[in-house]
Amino acid sequence: MYDLYKEQCASNGKDCPSNWLYRDVFGETGLKFKLPYVDTCKTCDEFNIKSKYLNGEELELLTERNNIHKNMFDSAYRSKQEDKALLNTTPALKIIVFDLQQCLPTPDLKTNVVFYKRQLWTYNETIRDIGSKESYCYMWHEGLAGRGSNEIGSILYKHIMEKIPNSINHLITYSDTCAGQNRNINVAIMFMLAIQNHPTLQIIDQKFLVPGHTHLECDSDHSRIEKAKKLSDCEISIPIDWYNFVRNVRGKIPLKVVEMEMEHFKNFSALLSGTLIKRNIDENKDKINWLKISWLRYDKSFGIIQFKNSLDTEAPFRKLDIRKITGKTRSGKEPTNVSQVILPQAYNKPNPIDTEKKKDLLSLLPLIRPIYHPFYHGLKTKTKNTPKNNNDSSDDE
């Protein structure tokens, strides 16, 4: 870092301070270095390995692909920085980033037998407001609801309707590219409904970083939680203990916990069997690959999704029309009265967990206080006829 700083000073024609002064000032920032031992990029790792033994034309092709990859994630981070800079001059703009934290095991025990047992997962979807520097942790557990696109969409919808003030007309979001949670038709429907029902929003831009290079500001909130837990002897027996623990994590930015209830989760996918229809071709009859989309835009035209496969502001948007064809208008598409759209609940009863998981949880009851036993006895389990949640995914595509 100091060598890079010296190069910058030289290029700007400025005198460079000594190494010890640089280290002293850098230490005051509170920033630290550590090796990126988790969540490394598959493409970059593959290049680092193969470049050691390939040569000739194969190495040239590999290097070319890697350079394209580097340009993509550099462009994505640059786009994010440019958007953040707009906050200084555009008061009607709001930028949020969001991500689902690694599942929190419940109960959280140190006994060695726990390693062989399936525990209940407590979830934390964190939304960081870049402008106001506020962090919201929307928390629930798998005995209440899953962690698919309807659940993530419900949290975002709740946040937009309750936390985005009426002075905002443009919302930009950044997230990773997880297809099961962030980049899919259900979340797109949610954004279309949100912009219709919010009093002042005119445009919502949903942008995605490049897989393997998806560092977001809310990741530091997750790191704070994990670090605080390692240093704490706090007892975590049931999900509400996690909620209270996160509330009390110290830091410059307080973590505001929102406890999700069953009625907060909506079924956005249900609209595809009524008002809207799922299509995989754009208005020019070209096929759409959702895994390649980098930017989705929503406006007041309900049922119309604009998208592009890059974050290049100069590149044109393509259009996806998911309104149903009825023949009632000249265009053949029926205009939708959003005020008449009924958004059904995602759950009418608690989300059942796997039978074997409940057996493991009950076997752990001797390790937690009796006052918490009724919670685990009351967990519902799946039957043979219980439908599988196909959206329950958390992997980057």
Image (tube, rainbow, N blue to C red):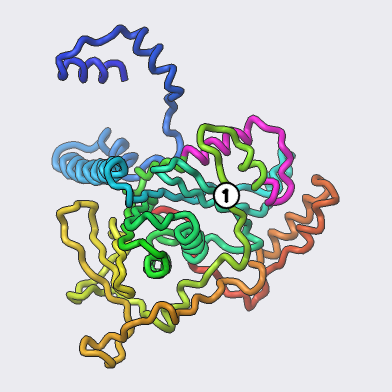
Residue at left 21%, top 66%? 318
Quadrant assignment, res 305: bottom left
Residue at left 52%, top 63%? 151
Magenta: main secondary structure: helix
Residue 288 percent coordinates (x, y): 26, 69
The one of 58 and 358 positioned closer to us in this rendering: 358
Q: Which residue is mark 1?
A: 103
Tell me the amino acid under the disc marked 1.
Answer: Cys
| Left or right of 393 in this view: 16 | left
Q: Residues within 10 Å of mark 1 (few under 14, many from 20)?
A: some
The one of 204 and 186 positioned closer to us in this rendering: 204
**Residue 72 in sight:** yes
Q: Magenta includes 120?
A: no
The one of 137 and 374 positioned closer to us in this rendering: 137
Instruction: Please give the count of numbered marks on the rendered protein.
Output: 1
**Residue 393 in sight:** no
Residue 339 vertical position relative to residue 94 in the rendered view, above or below: below
What range of the chain is rendered magenta? 220-242
